[in-house]
Amino acid sequence: AVFGRVQKGDAMIEQMKPMDIEKRSFAIITELLGDTKLEEENELVIKRVIHTTADFDYVIGSVHYLPAGDTPLAIDEGVDELTALTERYYGGDIISAAECYFSLVAEVGTVTGAGIVGHFDLITKYIERGLKLDTLSPRYCRAWQRAADRLLSEGLIFEINTGVVSRGYRSSPYPSAEMIDYIAAHGGRFILSSDSHRTDTLCYGFEECRDAFCARYGERSRELLLESPLS
């Protein structure tokens, strides 16, 4: 291949080696990130994802795994799986697992560079399917409030996720009403997302969710709930 500049009609087209394309792309990504700081161990991975998948309109960061020995294990594979994970690695104390989970959620903005935090209380996915998790426990409340405070201080937007309802796991979206109240009271903002894995559940429950939100927060809804939902 010949690399350099070639004329095509009235336009001059630059031909570049693949490594030079990647180098320039990384430089542009770094410039666009501006003051966003990425942890050194994750920086190249995040930039390569952006480079290989083109520009993002938005980035949602979330936590799906907990430390479990040498290999992290998913918390959203089933109630039995989460219970077994808790028994084996957290002494059967689901609150300890939740504390670990929220400590990781608190780092979402720093680790991923995301502007939106997804399904903030994912660990409650199976609470209506028999998961024994006391969401009124003072330890549990302190854990999620610390995480929320950190994310709020960094300006992250909180996703209201209706996907958990469309897939039949919960009767209400993530995060819980108590969490939404806390985040709203501390100046947080929200955006609707259906977290859809299928075309027939795109924008699932948005109208009902928006109506309920507006009924709860009245005029404040305009500042709390962003206009552009995510499908």
Image (cartoon, helix red, strand yellow):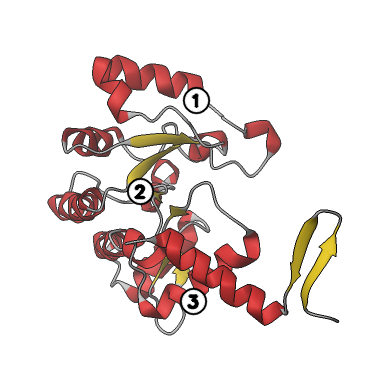
Q: Bin the neighbour count of mark 2 within 10 Å (Cα to Cα): few under 14, some 14-19, many 20 and up.
A: many
The residue positioned 27% from the left and 59% from the top of the image is 106
Q: Bin the neighbour count of mark 1 within 10 Å (Cα to Cα): few under 14, some 14-19, many 20 and up.
A: some
3D distance between C-alphas at marks 2 and 1? 18 Å
Report if residue 64 is visible in the image.
no
Q: Position of residue 47 (x, y in %)?
A: 51, 69
Taking 170 as reference, is 36 left or right?
left
Locate residue 18: give its quadrant. Answer: bottom right
The residue positioned 50% from the left and 71% from the top of the image is 27
Residue 211 higher or lower than 225, as above or below: above
Q: Which residue is mark 1?
A: 206
Residue 91 higher or lower than 151, as above or below: below
Q: Amino acid at mark 2?
A: Phe
The residue positioned 63% from the left and 45% from the top of the image is 197
Q: Amino acid at mark 3?
A: Leu
Q: Nearer the viewer, mark 3 or mark 2?
A: 3
Q: Position of residue 30 (x, y in %)?
A: 45, 67
Report if residue 4 is visible in the image.
yes
Query: Which image quadrant: the N terminus?
Result: bottom right
Q: Which residue is mark 3?
A: 44
Q: Bin the neighbour count of mark 3 within 10 Å (Cα to Cα): few under 14, some 14-19, many 20 and up.
A: few
Q: Amino acid at mark 1?
A: Phe
Q: Secondary structure at mark 2?
A: loop
Q: Secondary structure at mark 3?
A: helix
Q: Which residue is mark 2?
A: 120
Residue 207 higher or lower than 74, as above or below: above
